[in-house]
Each structure stands twice: as structure tokens, then as C-alpha cells.
Image (tube, rainbow, N blue to C red):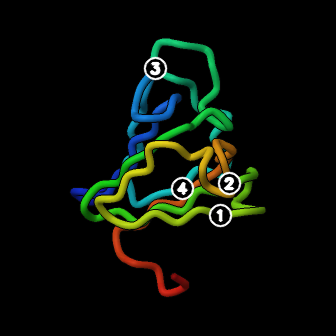
Amino acid sequence: MPTDGCWVRVWEHKNFTGRSETFTGPGEDWKLGDNKWPGSDDEIGDDIDSLATGPNAWFEGFEDENFTDSVIRVGPRESIADLDQMEIGDNIDSYRLYDARPPHW
């Protein structure tokens, strides 16, 4: 069941522009490539350039499917205008979204 304030919104371009999608949690998706941008057949995976989290959201984005390779961790009420500036870049292929701070953080 979704938790109020547990969400991550992703945009296809930096500075929160272009198509966007919001994922609610807690939850996870092991293969973002199965998701499409709204009104399009274009895959979301490997095409996220900016993101923002809700007030009760702890987000982990993984470079590869199945929660593997490099990871980016973003806490509540945070936003990143240009993921290309981060080690992981726009290469988010899977994610986990928590409604409380995970013990491994």
C-alpha cells in the first residue's frame, strides 16, 4: 500500500524538463526498461536526467537491472537537476523506494 509522501518523480531531461513520470512507494522496479514515458513507446530506463523525491521517500537508483552495479541514494525532499553530474549519470535501470530510512544507509 502506498505511503503518503513516498514518491520519486523523474524527468527525461536535466533541470526538470521534458516528459516526466512519478513512481509511488514503498516499492521497487527491477527493470525500468519495462516502463514507458507517458504517451510514448520510449523506455524510461537509461533516460532519466533529473529527479525529485517526496517528503517521506528514500530512493536508491541502480545503474543496472536487478539492483546491481553503481547506486545513487537520494533522501527526502531532495532534487537533482542534472544526473549527468553524478557518477551514475542517467543510467538508472532499476530502483528501490522506501518510506523510512533503510538501515544500510
Dot 3 or dot 1: first in sequence order is 3
Image point 68% across, 57% down: which residue?
Answer: 87
Dot 4 or dot 3: first in sequence order is 4
Q: CA distance from mark 3 to mark 2?
A: 24 Å
In the rendered image, residue 29, in percent from the top left (x then y), is placed at 58, 50
User: What secondary structure is marked by label 4?
Assistant: strand
Image point 51% across, 29% down: which residue?
Answer: 13
Q: In the depicted view, which residue is nearer to us: 21 or 25?
A: 21
Report the disc number at residue 71. Answer: 1
Looking at the image, is 45 positioned above or below residue 43?
A: below
Say what amino acid the circle numbered 3 marks.
Pro
User: What secondary structure is marked by label 1?
Assistant: strand
Report the disc number at residue 28. Answer: 4
Q: Quadrant of residue 26?
A: bottom left
Q: Label 2: which residue?
A: 88
Say what amino acid the circle numbered 1 marks.
Val
Q: Are marks 1 and 2 in contact (CB under 8 Å)?
A: yes
The quadrant in which the N terminus is found is bottom left
Q: CA distance from mark 3 to mark 1?
A: 25 Å
Q: Label 3: which residue?
A: 38
In the rendered image, residue 70, in percent from the top left (x then y), is placed at 72, 63
Dot 1 or dot 2: first in sequence order is 1
Looking at the image, is 105 positioned above or below residue 58?
A: below
- Mark 3 vs mark 2, foreground winner is 2
